[in-house]
Amino acid sequence: YLTNTRVNSDWSASPDKLAAILIQKWVAFVHIDGLEAWSDYRKSGGISSPTSPKSIIAAASPEPVRLLYPLRETQVNTANVPGSIDRFTSKIFWDVN
């Protein structure tokens, strides 16, 4: 694997070293810590994964821009959970992208 001379897996064969590191990190985390993989994908503008992480069903929809509150939070803290959050368009206040 380390000597297969493929882009993004072999260091010397990868012209974009940062993309190679991010893709390898994405591969390592995608099934262990999906939130970390998704965050890196969003921070890097999509270069941290070989393909878009959208599902086949969501292929025509935009990618989500934020996570929703857990169901438990909406059950026990209804007064403080905003009700009009759209995961595809409602960006969180600090997201400037």
Image (cartoon, grey):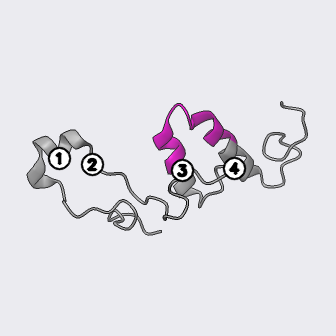
Furthest-front residue in this view: 57
Real-space CA distance between mark 3 and mark 1, rounded to the nearest whole angstrom: 26 Å
Residue position for label 3: 55
* Circle 2 residues within 10 Å: few <14, some 14–19, many ≥20: few
User: At 66% across and 56% down in the image, what residue appears?
Assistant: 47
* Circle 3 residues within 10 Å: few <14, some 14–19, many ≥20: few
Q: Which mark is residue 50?
A: 4
Dot 1 falls on a residue whose secondary structure is helix
Real-space CA distance between mark 2 and mark 4, rounded to the nearest whole angstrom: 28 Å
User: At 57% across and 36% down in the image, what residue appears?
Assistant: 29
* Circle 4 residues within 10 Å: few <14, some 14–19, many ≥20: some
Dot 2 falls on a residue whose secondary structure is loop
Give the label, 3 or 2, closer to the camera.
3
User: At 90% across and 35% down in the image, what residue appears?
Assistant: 4
Badge 3 amino acid: Ser
Q: Please report contact status of discs 1 and 2: CB closer than 8 Å, yes or no.
A: yes
Q: Is residue 17 left or right of residue 42?
A: right
Real-space CA distance between mark 3 and mark 2, rounded to the nearest whole angstrom: 21 Å
Is 25 in the magenta? yes
Dot 3 falls on a residue whose secondary structure is loop
Residue position for label 2: 69
Q: Please report contact status of discs 3 and 1: CB closer than 8 Å, yes or no.
A: no
Residue 40: give x, y in percent of width and height. 55, 49
* Circle 1 residues within 10 Å: few <14, some 14–19, many ≥20: some
Q: Quadrant of residue 85?
A: bottom left
Badge 4 amino acid: Pro
Q: Which residues are magenta?
A: 24-39
Residue 87: give x, y in percent of width and height. 36, 59
Residue position for label 1: 74
